[in-house]
Amino acid sequence: MANDAVAGNALRVAPAQPGATDDPVHGVLVAFARDLVNDVDDTLSAFLTREVDALTEIDAAMGGFAATARESVLAGGKRVRPTFAYWGWRGVVGGDAPLPTVLPALAALELLHTFALVHDDVMDASDTRRGLPTVHRAAAARHVTAGHTGDPSRFGESVAVLIGDLCLVWADRLLAHATVPPARLLEVRRCYDQMRIETIAGQYLDVLGENDAANWSVDQALRVARYKTASYTVQRPLLFGASLAGIAPDAPLIAAYTRYGLAVGEAFQLRDDLLGVYGDPAATGKPAGDDLRTGKPTVLLMLARQLATGGQRRALERAGTAVGVREVARLADIVADTGAVGRVEHMISDRVADALAALGTASIDETARTALTGLATAATTRRA
């Protein structure tokens, strides 16, 4: 189940120092990460049950549609965004504040994430997500099985767009269930809205880059990473959590969270770039070499083109047209031979170091500091 995977994967809190795996504090944090994910999942499950029941009353077909949306939310995932938001909140309030008051807001970030994933899969024409058919592919298959008229692919994409939209509305509704003072919730909404705007901006730049890959640059690829991933995966969730705690927007901790979140978020995406070419499909849930097969202008591919010799560059122009497994594997070897993989690994290390330096400047709850230190490493050394 997802919770067990989380405990041993991206949400596992790494030891603060080498050799500290037997540290009892580390053990407590690992157990707490598991408990937090369970709490978020329980909150989502209870909320979605009510929402699915309400939609079923409209029409039985709506019930099936809403159930598909619910399954998309609850079908695994690392719950990275609620976790960073939690530690952003905990870093301000310490260990005594009651978690149930903010749990709906933390869980709402997972609904926002599902919205982004479902729409992203349509735009990327992806076949799988977390090892299962993507929403639009599954809906298209149901269209065929049911013997409906019309284009199954078009139907599947339409259903997926509506499911993503529904998750976005559900995120707003669940966020409103947080029991914090109205004025504070307004500040939280400002942070949440900015997160959504930056996510859409990053997604548009990603789409643009895929359609203008020949003219794309490393700087533009990094900008996509900053707004599509860093903003809504780490940086804004941390600030969202701080807003839930009622911290002033100009407090010094906000600057530290912003620096940490940008660094870890970019490193998170850079790791994704590497996994998109060299990841194990059993762990990533996606075919190996997908980014090379589609010619996605990631930082990794842009660096490879920048560092390539003339012959290597001509070969890399095949990215986006390669279809065979051997051809994709050959392109992956060429990317590594250019030195781009080592360069990206160095960029990840530099960003993690900058994130930890930012934490060192912050006045923050010490348990939260330990957790965020571990998460900076765990989120950027993952295999999925």
Image (spheres, helix red, strand yellow):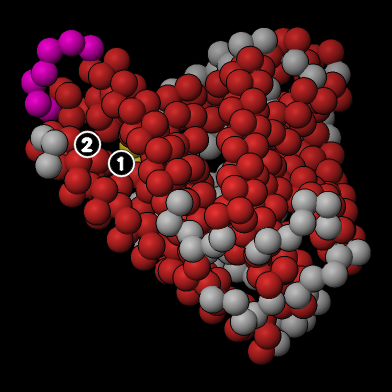
Q: Nearer the viewer, residue 337 or 180?
A: 180
Residue pointed to by mark 2:
65
Pointer 2: residues within 10 angstroms few (<14), some, or many (20+)? Answer: some
Q: Main secondary structure of the magenta part?
A: loop
In the image, residue 359 sits, relative to residue 164, either above or below, namely below
Work out whether residue 22 can be spotted.
Answer: no
In the image, 265 versus 381, the foreground residue is 265
| Residue at x-position 37% and y-position 26% | 161
Q: Secondary structure at mark 1?
A: helix
Q: Is residue 62 above or below residue 252?
A: above
Q: Position of residue 39 (x, y in %)?
A: 43, 69
Dot 1: within a 10 Å radius of its alpha carbon, few (fewer than 14), some, or many (20 or more) residues?
A: many
**Residue at horizontal 36%, vertical 51%?**
75
Choose between 130 and 309: the one closer to the eye: 130
Q: Is residue 59 left or right of residue 54?
A: left
Dot 2: element: helix
Residue 239 part of the magenta segment: no
Instruction: Tell me if residue 148 is in the magenta stretch.
Output: yes
Write the residue at 65% across / 28% down.
202
Type of amino acid under label 1 = Ala
Check disc 1 and report the residue beneath it. 69
Q: Which residues are magenta?
A: 145-151
Residue depicted at 87% across the width and 58% down the height: 252
Query: Does the CB distance between marks 1 and 2 fall below 8 Å?
Result: yes
Q: Is residue 358 left or right of residue 8?
A: right
Per the model, the C-alpha gap separating discs 1 and 2 is 7 Å
The N terminus, quarter of image = bottom left
Instruction: Name the mark on residue 263.
Output: none
